[in-house]
Amino acid sequence: MYQAFDVNQVKEYSLINDRGEDRTIFLLGVLDSKLEFFLADKTKSFGLNTKSQEDSPATIHLEIDVHNWRVVKYGLKGWKNFKNPKTGEDYPFRTQVENIQGVGPRNAVHADSLDLLKPIIKELAKEILQINKVTEQDEKN
């Protein structure tokens, strides 16, 4: 029997290289199906050369880095113990509601907060996408 996928689940995650006692914890969430498919479609574009009489190849354009940035923008739900190195204080986690055409309103990480994550966007995106998959264990249950 297949069980429903919990789109409200949140996973605590620490970066691969962050193994100290006071690790930063990132709260990673699931992307709902409409948003996930929208983001996947925004990543790809295809084109044909219609001006040429000759056979010319189609073009494919992939925006992988932009996709990773968007996945974190909508999939990161918070953080714990994320410090400002100058003050030692926690950075506030800021969000905003964005109305995505064709999808509707969704919570998003504010641009100021996203800028703090620049060196780790790819790692966080990879983990967010991983929790959006049905595992073999889920299929067995």
Image: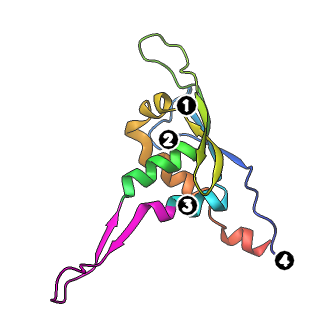
Q: Nearer the viewer, residue 2 or 66?
A: 66
| Circle nearer the N terminus (2, 4) | 4
Number of numbered labels in the structure image: 4
Mark 2 and mark 1: span between their CA atoms? 8 Å
| Circle nearer the N terminus (1, 3) | 1
**Which residue is the site of mark 2?**
15
Segment colored magenta: 40-62
Density class for disc 1 (Cα within 10 Å; few <14, some 14-19, many ≥20) is some
SS type, badge 4: loop
Mark 1 and mark 3: span between their CA atoms? 30 Å
Query: Do labels 2 and 1 touch, CB within 8 Å?
Result: yes
SS type, badge 2: loop
SS type, badge 1: loop
Amino acid type of disc 2? Answer: Leu
Q: Which mark is residue 38?
A: 3
Q: Which mark is residue 1?
A: 4
Mark 4 and mark 3: span between their CA atoms? 29 Å
Residue at (76, 75) in percent of width and height: 140
Density class for disc 4 (Cα within 10 Å; few <14, some 14-19, many ≥20) is few
Density class for disc 2 (Cα within 10 Å; few <14, some 14-19, many ≥20) is some
**Which residue is the site of mark 1?**
24
Mark 4 and mark 1: span between their CA atoms? 37 Å
Residue at (65, 62) in percent of width and height: 33
Q: Nearer the viewer, residue 35 or 2?
A: 35
* Quadrant where the N terminus is found in the figure: bottom right
Query: Do labels 2 and 4 touch, CB within 8 Å?
Result: no
Amino acid type of disc 1? Answer: Thr
| Circle nearer the N terminus (2, 1) | 2
